[in-house]
Amino acid sequence: ILRAYFTFLTKIKYFGFCKFILISFYETKFILINFFKYKINIYDFIDETNLFKDKKYKKQFAGYSPIPEYFLSKIFKYLNKNIKIEEFNFIDLGSGLGRVVFFSSNYNFIKHEGIELSLELYNKSKKNLQKVNINNIYFHYKNFFEFSFKNENTVIFMNDAIKKYQTFNELINKILIEFSNSKLIFVYYNPTYKDKVLETSKFKLLNQYIYQKSRGYCIFKKLWQVSYLGRKYIEYII
C-alpha cells in the first residue's frame, strides 16, 4: 500500500505545493479509512505491462489511473445538490479497483455499477466487494463497447479512458442511442475531448473544474430530443 501511495503522489505533483498538500491529506485519509475500516484497497500498485489480455486494447484505452478523493468529493457534492440522485443509476466506465463505484455508494443511487476490461483489476474489485455489505453494487468484466446499457436514467462516469477521438466518438454515439429515452448525466474526468462532446449539440455543460488544458472534470447532461422540432435538441429539467 505504501508503494502504491507514493506512486499516487508522483501523479499529483503538478498541482502546485498548496494544492498538492491539500489533495495528499484528503487522499491519505481516504486510503486509510477504506483500508482499516472496510479492509478494501482503493489504490494499488499496478504493473501495466500486461494490463489487458488483448494487446489491441493498449492502443485504444488508457491504463490504470485512479481519481483523487479531493475531486470525487467535489463531483458528487455537485451531483447530490443538483440532480435527484435517487432516480438515477450510476455506472463507472473503466472501474479499476472500484474506487469511484464504492465512493458513489455513499449516495442514494438506485444501483452502482462498474465496467472493467482488465481481468486483474476486475478480480481485485470483486475481492473488495466481498468485504463490504452493500447489495446494490455490481462489477462487470467486459469491454464497455460490448455492454448493453439499460435505457434508464443514469449517471455515467468516465476517467480519460479512451486514447483516440474516433473511439471516443463511437462511445458518445452508443450512449446517445442506448439512453435515447432516458435522462443521462455524463461525468468526464480529465476531459481530453470536452469540446467534441459540446460540438454534438446534444449535451449541455452543467459544471466544470479545469486547472490545466484537459485536467479536471466536466459534468454534462444529455439534451432531450423532441421529434416535432426536427433535429433541434432542447434541455430537460433534472
Image (cartoon, grey):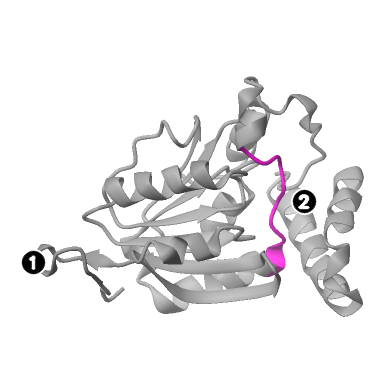
Q: Residue at x 87, y 74 (%)?
A: 16
Q: Position of residue 95 (x, y in %)?
A: 58, 43
Q: Are marks 1 and 2 in contact (CB under 8 Å)?
A: no
Q: Which residues are magenta?
A: 61-70
The answer to whether residue 227 is left or right of residue 110 is: left
Q: Position of residue 58 (x, y in %)?
A: 67, 31
Characterize the magenta stretch by its predominant secondary structure: loop
Asked if residue 198 is among those painted magenta in the image, a careful observer would answer no
Asked if residue 67 is among those painted magenta in the image, a careful observer would answer yes
Q: Residues within 10 Å of mark 1 (few under 14, many from 20)?
A: few
Circle 1 residue: 228
Circle 2 residue: 36
Q: Nearer the viewer, residue 44 or 174?
A: 174
Q: Residues within 10 Å of mark 2 (few under 14, many from 20)?
A: few
Residue type, mark 1 in image:
Tyr
| Mark 1 residue element | helix
Q: Position of residue 144 (x, y in %)?
A: 47, 37
Q: Quadrant of residue 225?
A: bottom left
Residue type, mark 2 in image:
Phe
Q: Quadrant of residue 26?
A: bottom right
Q: Residue at x 35, y 71 (%)?
A: 84
Is 150 placed above or below 221 here? above
Q: Residue at x 79, y 56 (%)?
A: 32
